[in-house]
Image: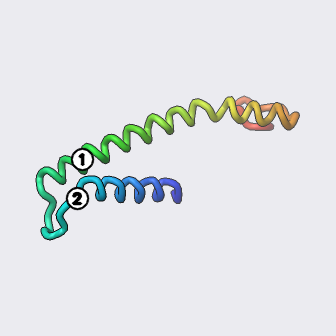
Amino acid sequence: LRDFLLVYNRMTELCFRHCVCNLNYRLLTGREESCLDSCAARLVRANHRLMGAYVGLVPALLQRRAAEHGAPAGPSGLPA
């Protein structure tokens, strides 16, 4: 949960700094809103791709770590 909140806060700050230019108005302009939408979508897609790669690598990393420590790996790839 902490990591998720850190990613969310970083994304919010990055997109805000990139897209919001004028703080004189209470509401976002159409241009700012579309910039924020595309910025957030781009970062969410990138995060999904990274998480997909991470999920694909975890079993191999766990098996290698188990082999290094001499513990037999269970069916889920975790050390028994």
Q: Secondary structure at mark 2?
A: loop
Q: Which mark is residue 1?
A: none
Type of the residue with mark 2: Val
The colour scheme is: rainbow
Q: Residue at label 1? A: 37
The amino acid on which the numbered mark 1 sits, given as a three-letter code, is Asp
Q: Position of residue 53 (x, y in %)?
A: 53, 32
Judge from the rendering whether residue 24 lies leftward or rightward of residue 79; answer left or right: left
**What x and y, as percent, mark residue 23?**
19, 68
How many marks on residues?
Answer: 2
**21 versus 55 height, above or below:** below
Q: Nearer the viewer, mark 1 or mark 2?
A: 2
Residue behind mark 2: 20
Q: Where is residue 57? Give x, y as percent.
A: 61, 31
How far apart are labels 1 and 2 at the CA level?
A: 12 Å
Q: Residue at x 37, y 43 (%)?
A: 44
Vertical side of 32 occupied by 71: above or below: above
Residue extending furthest right? Answer: 70
The crowd level at tag 1 (other Cα within 10 Å; few <14, some 14-19, many 20+) is: few
Q: Are marks 1 and 2 in contact (CB under 8 Å)?
A: no
- Counting from the top left corner in percent of width and height, residue 77 is at 71, 32
At x 20%, y 60%, the residue is: 21
Measuring 22% from the left and 48% from the top, which residue is drawn there?
Answer: 35
